[in-house]
Amino acid sequence: MLADLWAQTLSTAITVIVLALLAALTRRAPAQFGDLTVLRLPTAMQVVAWVSLLFFTGLLALVIVELVRHPDDVKKLRTAAIGVPLCLGLIVIVLAERRVQLGFDDEGIGGRTAFRGLRRVAWRDLVQVTWSNGGYWFRLRDRDGNVLRVSAWLQGHHLAVDKLCQHVPAVVWQRAVQQWRARTGHRDQAER
């Protein structure tokens, strides 16, 4: 019992430390190409994505091998029924998310998204900005109904938030930015 509690406490502490370090990497300066600022996952997160991809692929292979070796084992069949779709889903998510790359300038923000291809929204056309604590992203919706998610895991995302605040009326973004600041600890550009 005490050993389980210690293991859970240790794994939670390690997870919190790793996530804090990864979040700190997002505050580094993003790539700059003239007026265009490019947001992408930090290199450390790319490494974590590749390691995760290898892990989930290996786990999937292990589950399939065990299923082939013991096709009549009901317990292994149940494990496979849960494990195979879970691993496949996680592999797809890791592959898709690591491709995300957005760029912004004074006109708007856009780029390659995980699942919806290329998207772009103009700052002047934004009618709604929401923050998702669970997804850890901003959801930008323009007057035509186009949606773009800007993940807080992208390096330099705070600069996109500053640009959003400069070019979009406060009534559109104020609540979302307050929620983001409360969640991430980012301060207003004027406070820095």
Image (cartoon, helix red, strand yellow):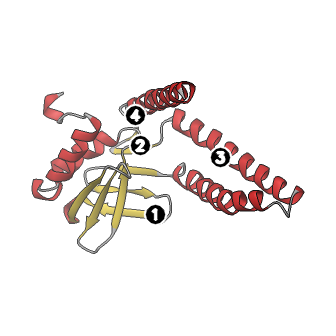
Q: Residue furthest front?
A: 1
State which tag comes first along the sequence, 3 or 2.
3
Task: Name the residue furthest right.
Answer: 69
Q: Nearer the viewer, residue 162 or 83?
A: 83
Q: Residues within 10 Å of mark 2 (few under 14, many from 20)?
A: many
Q: The disc labelled 2 sits on which kind of residue?
A: Leu
Residue 96 % position (x, y): 55, 56
The x, y position of residue 94, in whole percent, is 57, 51
The answer for how far apart the CA atoms under marks 4 and 1 are is: 25 Å
Mark 2 lies on residue: 154
Labels 2, 4: front one: 4
First of labels 3, 1 by sequence position: 3
Question: Is 85 placed above or below 18 here?
Answer: below
Quadrant where the image shows the N terminus: top right
Q: Secondary structure at mark 4?
A: helix
Residue under numbered circle 1: 118
Tell me how far mark 3 sits from mark 1, CA to CA: 24 Å
Q: Residues within 10 Å of mark 3 (few under 14, many from 20)?
A: some
Between disc 2 and disc 1, the foreground one is 2
Looking at the rendered structure, the secondary structure element under dot 1 is: strand
Q: Which circle's residue, 2 or 1, is located before the other in the chain?
A: 1
Label 2 vs label 1: CA separation? 16 Å
Q: Which disc, if any, is residue 23? A: 4
| Mark seen at residue 53 | 3
* Marks 3,1: beta carbons within 8 A: no
Secondary structure under tag 3 reads: helix
Which three-letter amino acid code belongs to the residue tagged 3?
Leu
